[in-house]
Amino acid sequence: MHTSYTYLADGEPAQLAESWEPMAITGGSLIVLPEAGPHAGIGVADRMALIGIEVGTPVERVTARQATRSEAQNLGVAPAVPVLAIERTYYDQATGRPVETADIVLLGSRWIAEYGQRP
């Protein structure tokens, strides 16, 4: 299942996301459509739990780069503005198989990345 998202902040586009989930895992279930049905919009981990799959913290690869033309157009900015690009994958904790992967693009001027837990 492929889903595209544009997230707004203060009414303006601030984040883009392209998400993929294997139909072999979600097909035929009530969670097949991430944004429709009785469990719409509850997030990957909570949706997967409904079909008996426990996911842990996703693996994320974060880079900084210039926005592509398409990204800039969708974000309503000039081409080549700085963005954070995140490749994120959630895994089934029991089998190690990927259950969702996403390419996320954040406007560099609107986001700060902070990782870890404070004491």
Image (tube, rainbow, N blue to C red):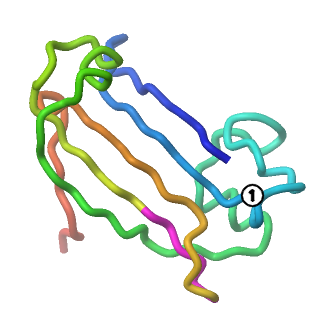
Question: Which kind of residue does numbered mark 1 sit on?
Answer: Met
Residue 74, position as x, y percentages in the image: 35, 18
What residue sits right under mark 1 in the picture?
23
Q: Which quadrant of the structure image shows residue 7?
A: top left
- Kindly identify the residue that appears in the image at 36 percent across and 11 percent down: 11
Where 39 sits versus 50, above or below? above
Range of the magenta residues? Answer: 89-94
Seen in the image, is 94 located left or right of residue 91? right
Seen in the image, is 104 located left or right of residue 43? left
Q: Does the magenta stretch include residue 36?
A: no
Residue extending furthest toward the front: 69
- Kindly identify the residue that appears in the image at 68 percent across and 43 percent down: 34
Where 59 sits versus 22, above or below? below
Seen in the image, is 40 located left or right of residue 96? right
**Helix, strand or loop under label 1:** helix
Residue 14, position as x, y percentages in the image: 30, 25
- Kindly identify the residue that appears in the image at 39 percent across and 47 percent down: 103
* Quadrant location of the C terminus in the rendered image: bottom left
Callout count: 1
